[in-house]
Amino acid sequence: MADKLTQKNRMPEWITSPTSRALAALIVVFVLGLLFHAEGAFYKWGTHRDMLRAVSVYGILACGMTLVIITAGIDLSVGSVLALTAVLFALTTIHWQWPFWLAILFCLAVGGVCGGFSGYLIGRFRIQPFIATLAMMVFARGVAKWVSGGQKISTAVQQPDGTYQYVSVPDIFTLINAKIFGGNLTVVTVILLACILISWILLTRLRQGRYMLAIGGNEQAAVLSGVPVNPIKILAYGMAGLFSAVAGICQASQELQGDPEAGVAYELSAIAMVVIGGTSLQGGRGSLWLTLIGILTIGYLEKILSINAVGEDKRLMLTGVIIIAAVLLQKNK
Amino acid sequence: MKNGMILLIAVCLGLILFGGGCGKTESPEGEPGGRTIGMSQCNLGEPWRVQMNADVRRAAEAHPNLRVIFKDAQNDTLKQQAQMEEFISAGVDLIIISPKEAAPLTPVVAQAYAKGIPVLVLDRRVLGDQYTCFIGADNKKIGKAAGQWIVDTLGGQGKVVELKGLMTSTPGQDRHTGFREGIEGSDLEIIFEADMKWLEPNARKEMESALARFPQIDLVYAHNDPGAHGAYLAAKAAGREQDILFVGIDGLPQEGQAYVSQGVLAASFEYPTGGKEAIETALKILAGQPVEKEITLTSRVFTQDTIDQGGQRLTE
């Protein structure tokens, strides 16, 4: 307690607040971009628009991940559920010619059920989140490979005689893959912003969000104060599954196909985004604003390395260093 | 409740094992007079390898006395070793292996060969000469052919982006060095190169960066077709797809060939799976005919002009 007081005396609160700390990392990365601008590429809005596009799918996963992490959990299955729903979205729209709204609802339902089931296992049977979602990660990947036959589901449709017939890309793919506002923003980025908004409302404006924070802060206390712990866990993981499905739909639309191998290791990027923002893995605190800052930090870092054509080896090393630096900035000394 | 859950899991497991397994596993004995081939695939996570198995299956289906048992090592060397041992103890008539890596799988291949089981090695090599036959294509030659095709198409000059596969993998290295050999002496300029790890979303990201930096790009050479397609999508989003040619490698029917016939790629260079040739060679071996120790598959190039005729064979 005494330490905290002296620290407060040393620095004004707006500097030590989690948001400022998270922003510090983002600003450092952004300044790197201004310095290494790759012949002016960093000064063009197109570069930033493309960064926002590339980071959107990860960001959508990070929204669900934030909710789960706030309940002191973790969801490793988001990348696999993304692949499963991407395959299902391509299958239903391209091969089975479903109307787009039905395909979207179906995929969202599948994602929600996958996540909700993990939440049910975690709440009802007290399986550790790491184990339950690890199982779902493996299982969903298996289902994705099974329904797709191990092949990408694309506009090349195999006929019974082994030849391929090429069909046109469904309109919904083109729509999600498009740019709006005079070509200055991509639709997937708008979808990301919508997901952030929905999660933010859930977390800060609804009772269920408060319960998530309570469970993450002290589960015993939450149980004793009458918080419906199990339903709230199903909700948190269900939302993560739902957002994975949204990400899967975006991924399929952008690739013009459903790839059962998509999304491998995406869960790690999503977790990194949440943690760099400053949401604690111990649960109980965190916010969507912090996650948004984390998303932008990782996005800008990748973009700057990419426009400067930095080699893969150095990229991995630099990314590791930046993650540690950003997390150290979060630490209360 | 907990018991109910365990029962449910058990039922699911049973369904997966028996429902999914029945269609694929066949008894090693087979019909009277039939011959059994064991096929060990290192990883079915890649479309190209799924295609290889499909090619083997299709070629084998034409011969009712052939039974092929497929095993997937899921990119695990030890698993593949175990599968080879299973084939040896099951006493199959011939083994086709597409090994994950050379050194650790060489002994088990040699062990089968020493027991008198013919072993066909597909795509990737094992060390030494303790196997019956190696069938594979040459990535370096394909990369070189792609380089020469690009030099011819661009008239010897232009600005090129190279999107590399995983540069720690031999196909990636060979497709890179072959390409550089192919363009040697020309005035082609490689203005941007990046590792996209064979993945389409990565290729799209890297291409966006290249587009942001360079107002003029004449051609994109990607180490696989999904990479070339990802680059195309990035260029299309920037409204620049008409100014750029896209060239990829692999030429799978549902990927490279489809993209060429849709006008997305200017060319796709086939990296043949050898599945059909493996069965042809296996039949010869089982009939007691001599086969060559090493069969190099010829590749085809698919372009807008040749796609309808099934591509054009590459010559030396």
Image (tube, grey):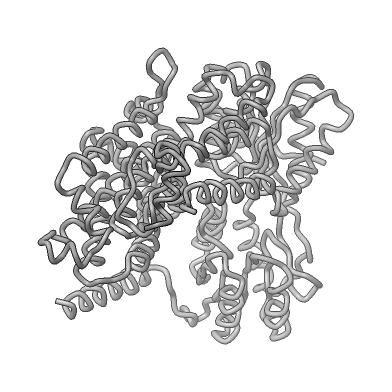
Across and down, in percent, residue A115 comes to 27, 55
The answer to which of A201 and B18 lies nearer the viewer is: A201
Question: Quick check: A190 left or right of B98?
Answer: left
Across and down, in percent, residue A180 comes to 38, 18
Question: Quick check: B60 left or right of A117?
Answer: right
Residue A234: quarter of image: bottom left
Residue A41: quarter of image: top right
Whether residue A151 is visible to the viewer of this picture, yes or no, is no
Count numbered badges in the picture: 0
Across and down, in percent, residue A278 comes to 42, 47
Residue lying at 40% horizontally and 53% vertically, measured from the top left: A4
In the image, residue A135 above or below residue A195: below
Across and down, in percent, residue B100 comes to 64, 65
Whether residue A54 is visible to the viewer of this picture, yes or no, is yes
Q: Quadrant of the C terminus of chain B?
A: top right
Question: Quick check: A323 left or right of B271?
Answer: left
The answer to which of B243 and A323 lies nearer the viewer is: A323
Residue lying at 49% horizontally and 54% vertically, measured from the top left: A333
Q: Residue furthest right?
A: B185
Residue lying at 50% horizontally and 41% vertically, measured from the top left: B254
Q: Quadrant of the N terminus of chain B?
A: bottom left
In the image, residue A324 above or below residue A16: below
Residue lying at 59% horizontally and 38% vertically, measured from the top left: B227
